[in-house]
Amino acid sequence: MKYSIKKGDNVLVLAGKDAKKSGEVLEVNRETGRVIVAGVNIQAHHKKPRSKDDKGGILKTEGAIDISNVQVICPVCKKATRVSHSVQGDTKSRICKKCGASLDVAKAKKATKKVESSAKKAQKAEKTEAEESKKATKTASKKKVQKSESAESTATKKTAKSSKKA
């Protein structure tokens, strides 16, 4: 079946013990029609230690809930809403029934923000590399100046000795 909920969507749980809780969709199983939502339907699994290094205990994990028990939360109007679809050219997008905003555009904006932030990090790294290379060239030039000064001083000492001998 086709579902309007995708991985990464923020959803509201409508039914069950975790009704009125919201979270991000971690996984969608289209064959069984179930979703795993972060922080919802927490189940305890008892684990027995199998070796000396392995620790046992009670592990808490998210369980799957039926996809019909969740609704997408629109990032624009912040309300749980049904989803309609619209086709514009070659692209198909999901639309909020309450405010008419595209649900896919908000994700595209988040993706572009991530790309922009990674680009800024790369620029900072380039700047720091450039500064380090400038520092390295400055120290190299200082060493050359010091060597030339020491060479000049030794040359003047030699000339002074030779003039004393004569």
Image: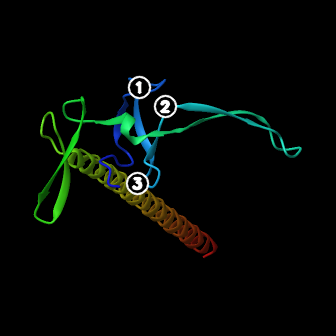
Q: How is the image coloured?
A: rainbow
The residues tagged by marks 3 and 1 sit, at their Cα atoms, a distance apart of 45 Å
Q: Amino acid at mark 2?
A: Val
Q: Nearer the viewer, residue 104 or 29?
A: 29
Which SS class for mark 3?
helix
Mark number, residue 21:
1
Which SS class for mark 2?
loop
- Measured as percent of width and height from the top left, residue 140 is found at 48, 64
Q: Circles 1 and 2: CB distance less than 8 Å?
A: yes
| Mark 3 surroundings: few (<14), some (14-19) or many (≥20) residues within 10 A | few
Q: Which residue is mark 2?
A: 40
Q: Which residue is mark 3?
A: 128
Which SS class for mark 1?
loop
For the N terminus, the image quarter is bottom left
Q: Amino acid at mark 1?
A: Lys
Q: Nearer the viewer, residue 147 or 59?
A: 59
Q: Nearer the viewer, residue 40 or 8?
A: 40
